[in-house]
């Protein structure tokens, strides 16, 4: 799915940074897993990945990318339902192994979900123009089809027709499909006021790009607490770098991830509020997004102090809350060397800033963002930071 801060373009750089501090393969902890792409990459190259993130949608992707042992059989569902022909081979992610035939039961389960008639559920009532609070995130047709799929998952998991890994795999495909037709520009912090062409496409399920490798571990825990429970060869840390809370910007995929498991769907729906249909999130706001005093820096420093890891790689952005100076000080402490002996720990990667207002789309937020130009740089050029260091022996 489209995810802010997704490191899919930096996987090679991250791997180089890890091998630069002596890591080949072993146990990797990914503390801010997001889309799960980094963990998936390390799993594919033979590491056991343990990950966490506060977001429910991230948890589903972690489950599929890190824990799925192989293609599920969908035996119980097949027993109950005469599953239709599989969705086309073009819906299979390129990353899957050549023996993709083992995925035919999954492709048939996807076809079963796609064939369901639309129903009026939570997504239709809350995130389409026809709801009591009209919100233009999804067309009624796509929301109704997604509602039907989610209710079928809820039923299948409850009745034992689906195992947990099977349910997670289908759910990841639904989150991804809804994301592709969501009427947004960038994040879910606002919906567009006119339908974007993507949003008018029919909802289409694709097989998530799973990989094979050691079975890892998915979590939905606060990294600031979870760090005490883990030990690893490589710690990968990619926290938010500004005040934008993910919970307020990805509420719709998060809700989709929760619908099949939520004990009381009516209470969940009743809690939805505001112009963009937020779900109450302030209690789980991340301290890593805080600009209050030194809260953010202190939380990060505390993670590094408590980390039981042989080496660390950190992704951050030069426009972020924590300064380069602070990072170097924390990394010297982690490595157990004097700051003056730290050596080169930073690799800078230039990129073009993504601007959601660049193509003139108007959203429910209305206003355009203004960005500070950085001295000596091209327009919209910013640097991604990649710090890496090993503990001294
Ligand atoms: C920059 S994104 C990570 C992107 C990820 N590396 C990827 O490639 O998709 C930061 C993530 O940190 C998560 N997060 C923020 N505070 C957290 C916390 N205290 N514990 C766990 N996850 C947190 C957010 O939900 C978000 O998914």
Image (spheres, rainbow, N blue to C red):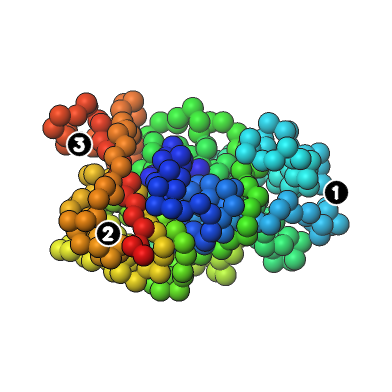
| 175 w.r.t. 361: above or below | below
Which residue corresponds to mark 1?
82
Q: Secondary structure at mark 1?
A: loop
Mark 2–mark 3 Cα distance, whole angstroms, equals 29 Å
How many residues crowd mark 1 within 10 Å: few (<14), some (14–19), many (20+)? Answer: few
Question: Which comes sooner in the sequence, label 1 or label 2?
Answer: 1
Q: Work out which quarter of the rendered image holds the C terminus and state it.
A: bottom left
| Residue, far left | 375
Callout in the foreground (3, 1): 3
The reply to whether discs 1 and 2 touch (Cβ–Cβ < 8 Å) is: no
Q: Say which quarter of the image contains residue 63.
A: bottom right
The reply to whether discs 3 and 1 touch (Cβ–Cβ < 8 Å) is: no
Left or right: where does residue 153 sit relative to residue 48? Answer: right
**Viewer-nearest residue: 100 or 182:** 100
**Residue at the image position 66 percent from the left and 41 percent from the top:** 96
Write down which quadrant ligand 1 falls in: bottom left
| 4 w.r.t. 300: above or below | above
Q: Say which quarter of the image contains residue 151.
A: bottom right
Question: Which comes sooner in the sequence, label 3 or label 1?
Answer: 1
Question: Which comes sooner in the sequence, label 2 or label 3?
Answer: 2
Left or right: where does residue 110 sit relative to residue 204? Answer: right
Q: Using the rendered image of the protein, determine whether residue 22 is visible from the camera's viewpoint.
A: yes
Mark 1–mark 2 Cα distance, whole angstroms, equals 57 Å
x, y percent for residue 355: 31, 33
x, y percent for residue 184: 41, 38
Which residue corresponds to mark 3?
371
Which residue corresponds to mark 2?
331
How many residues crowd mark 2 within 10 Å: few (<14), some (14–19), many (20+)? Answer: many
**Viewer-nearest residue: 372 or 70:** 70
x, y percent for residue 55: 45, 58
């Amino acid at each position: 799915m489209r995810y802010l801060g997704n490191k899919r373009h930096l996987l090679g750089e991250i791997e180089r940074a890890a091998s630069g501090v002596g890591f080949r393969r072993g146990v990797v902890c990914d503390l801010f897993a997001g889309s799960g792409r980094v963990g998936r990459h390390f799993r594919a190259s033979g590491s056991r990945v343990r990950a966490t993130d506060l977001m429910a949608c991230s948890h589903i992707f972690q489950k599929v990318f890190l824990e799925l042992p192989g293609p599920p059989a969908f035996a119980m569902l097949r027993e109950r339902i005469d599953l239709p022909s599989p969705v086309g081979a073009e819906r299979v992610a390129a990353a899957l192994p050549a023996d993709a035939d083992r995925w035919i039961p999954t492709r048939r389960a996807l076809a079963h979900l796609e064939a369901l008639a639309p129903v009026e559920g939570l997504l239709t009532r809350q995130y389409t123009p026809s709801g009591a609070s009209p919100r233009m995130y999804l067309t009624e047709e796509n929301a109704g089809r997604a509602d039907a799929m989610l209710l079928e998952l809820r039923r299948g998991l409850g009745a034992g027709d689906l195992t947990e890994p099977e349910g997670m795999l289908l759910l990841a495909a639904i989150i991804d499909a809804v994301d592709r037709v969501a009427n947004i520009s960038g994040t879910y912090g606002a919906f567009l006021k006119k339908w974007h062409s993507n949003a008018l496409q029919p909802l289409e399920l694709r097989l998530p790009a799973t990989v094979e490798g050691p079975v890892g571990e998915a979590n939905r825990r606060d990294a600031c607490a979870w760090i005490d429970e883990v030990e690893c060869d490589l710690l990968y840390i990619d926290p938010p770098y500004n005040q934008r809370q993910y919970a307020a910007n990805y509420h719709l995929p998060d809700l989709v991830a929760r619908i099949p498991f939520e004990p009381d769907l009516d209470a969940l729906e009743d809690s939805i509020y505001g112009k963009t249909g937020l779900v109450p999130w302030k209690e789980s706001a991340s301290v890593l997004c805080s600009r209050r005093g030194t809260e953010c820096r202190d939380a990060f420093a505390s993670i590094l102090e408590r980390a039981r890891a042989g080496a660390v790689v950190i992704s951050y952005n030069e426009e972020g809350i924590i300064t380069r100076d602070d990072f170097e000080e924390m990394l010297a402490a982690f490595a157990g060397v004097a700051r003056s002996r730290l050596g080169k720990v930073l690799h800078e990667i230039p990129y073009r800033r993504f601007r959601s207002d660049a193509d003139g789309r108007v959203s429910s937020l209305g206003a355009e963002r203004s960005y500070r130009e950085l001295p000596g740089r091209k327009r919209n050029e910013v640097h991604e930071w990649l710090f890496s260091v090993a503990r001294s022996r």
